[in-house]
Image: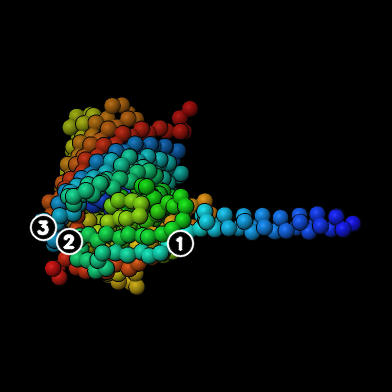
């Protein structure tokens, strides 16, 4: 049982998902820990992500547009996860952009660079089903993203474009389901993750916008190599619907369908410390209209877990 | 008594003229902001093409602020360049807000961004 719990934990730390094409407003999706925790367990995950985009896509093909040369960001996140009961886990994520930058091909256009606090997200996860014999866990969860960060950042009194604003400016609501299945030898693990996200309309004085809703499916299989090392491969499909702007006009060049192949590797330094690295490689991209497309991203997570019940 | 009245009248006249004079000084070196015009060299642009927007204003120590509901700016001060991609096709509002120690005044113009596919 202990072995199983450790395996699930290793897997779930490995099972990081880093969505968000570069660069859209707000935090990139980052769920370093998608499993639940046992009662009185506390876990901190420090995450870092670098993402870059340097080509436009029309549908599933690259297209030359002489505007943005490169869009990239460096992002850090702190996740705090606490097992309230054996079944209920609460998680709080806070994101910060070290930079969120666009450089331009147009002559004399200087780069746009945003930075600062992004969004905060709070999740409630419930261990709905847990069968140790079958090594099966089912964890539904709900979450809310709160735009606490900067959404009106300026340079020289000129407001930066929305794409480099650290915060999305919008409340978002998530519902997800995580299913984890282990094998009897404890070496392999399989997981399914599905999520739906609804973005609330932003209706402020100068801005009317609603991000498209998002549906995500992910399949991940992991393998333990020895006691400390784990590798995993994840296939993730991310769908975002079209956005709405003034007068409920549909933004035709918004929304996408992307499949990522994501190799993961994680290493446990001790019982409580883990380091995980992964890279998101898009293997299929379809963008509605013409949009900047994500080239790749790399992320790293350092996780520390403590049991507060132990004196 | 007559002398006192003359002094008092003179004092009132001096004060009145002084006040009038102060008002004149205030108008000559006003901090009031007036936006004379906010103009673009193109009011309709194809996605990712650039238009230059200029704000002509009078007043002292003016600070020019720019914001738009969709699209990108480059530059600062009285003149900026604006461009927007396919994401921003439609009529976009560009607002110039000018401020100094007395307050803030704003003016907006609409720029229509048409689709790249219409090129």
Label 1, secondary structure: give it. strand
Marks 3 and 1, how far apart at CA:
45 Å
Foreground residue, A210 or A42? A210
Question: Can residue A135 be seen from the camera position used here?
Answer: no
Label 2, secondary structure: give it. strand
Foreground residue, B32 or B96? B32
Quadrant of the image occupied by residue B111: bottom left
Question: Can residue A264 be seen from the camera position used here?
Answer: yes
Q: Confirm whether circles 3 and 1 share one chain.
A: no
Chain for disc number 3: A
Residue bearing the label numbered 3: A63
Label 3, secondary structure: give it. strand
Q: Nearer the viewer, mark 1 or mark 2?
A: 1
Foreground residue, A238 or A72? A72
Residue bearing the label numbered 1: B34
Count of marks overlaid on the render: 3
Q: Is residue B28 above or below residue A32?
A: below
In the picture, the disc for residue A290 is 2
Residue lying farthest to the front in this orientation = B3
Quick one: label 3, few (<14), some, or many (20+) residues within 10 Å?
some
Chain for disc number 1: B
Do the numbered discs 2 and 3 sit on residues whose CB atoms are within 8 Å?
A: yes
Give the image location of residue A295, x and y in percent.
Answer: 16, 48
Q: Which image quadrant: the N terminus of chain A?
A: top left
User: For the point 28% across and 52% down, which residue is it?
Assistant: B74
Q: Confirm whether circles 1 and 2 share one chain.
A: no
Marks 1 and 2, how far apart at CA:
41 Å
Marks 2 and 3, how far apart at CA:
8 Å
């Amino acid at each position: 049982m202990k072995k199983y719990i450790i395996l699930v934990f290793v897997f779930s730390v490995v099972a990081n998902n880093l969505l968000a094409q570069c660069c859209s407003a707000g935090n990139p999706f980052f769920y370093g820990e998608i499993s639940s925790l046992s009662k009185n367990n506390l876990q901190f995950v420090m995450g870092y992500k670098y993402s870059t985009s340097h080509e436009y896509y029309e549908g599933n093909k690259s297209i030359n547009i002489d505007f943005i040369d490169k869009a990239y960001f460096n992002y850090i996140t702190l996740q705090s996860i606490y097992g309230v009961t054996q079944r209920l886990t609460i998680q709080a994520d806070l994101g910060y952009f070290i930079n969120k930058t666009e450089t331009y091909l147009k002559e004399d256009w200087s780069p746009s660079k945003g930075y600062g606090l992004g969004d905060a997200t709070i999740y409630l996860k419930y261990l709905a089903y847990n069968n140790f014999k079958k090594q099966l866990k089912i964890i539904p969860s709900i979450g809310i993203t709160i735009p606490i960060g900067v959404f009106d950042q300026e340079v020289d009194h000129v407001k930066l474009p929305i794409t480099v604003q650290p915060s999305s400016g919008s409340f978002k609501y998530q519902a997800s389901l995580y299913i984890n299945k282990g094998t009897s030898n404890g070496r392999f693990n399989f997981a399914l993750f599905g999520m739906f996200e609804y973005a609330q309309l932003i209706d402020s004085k100068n801005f009317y916008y609603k991000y498209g809703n998002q549906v995500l499916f992910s399949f991940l299989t992991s393998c333990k190599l020895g006691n400390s090392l784990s590798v995993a491969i994840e296939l993730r499909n991310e769908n975002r619907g079209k956005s709405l702007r003034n007068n409920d006009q549909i933004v035709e060049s918004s929304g996408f369908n992307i499949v990522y192949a994501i190799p993961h590797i994680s290493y446990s330094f001790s019982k409580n410390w883990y380091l995980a690295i992964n890279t998101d490689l898009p293997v299929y991209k379809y963008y509605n209209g013409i949009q900047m497309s994500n080239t790749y991203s790399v992320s790293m997570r350092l996780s520390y877990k403590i049991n507060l019940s132990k004196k | 008594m007559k002398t006192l009245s003359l002094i008092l009248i003179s004092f009132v006249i001096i004060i009145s003229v002084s006040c009038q004079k102060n008002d004149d000084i205030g108008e000559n070196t006003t901090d009031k902001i007036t936006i004379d015009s906010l103009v673009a060299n193109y009011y309709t642009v194809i996605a990712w093409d650039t238009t230059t927007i200029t704000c002509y204003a009078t007043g002292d120590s003016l600070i020019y602020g720019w914001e738009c509901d969709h699209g990108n700016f480059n530059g600062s001060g009285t003149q900026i360049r604006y461009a927007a991609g396919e994401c921003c096709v439609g009529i976009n509002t560009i607002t110039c807000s000018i401020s100094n120690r007395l307050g803030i005044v704003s003016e907006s113009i609409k720029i229509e961004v048409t689709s790249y596919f219409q090129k």
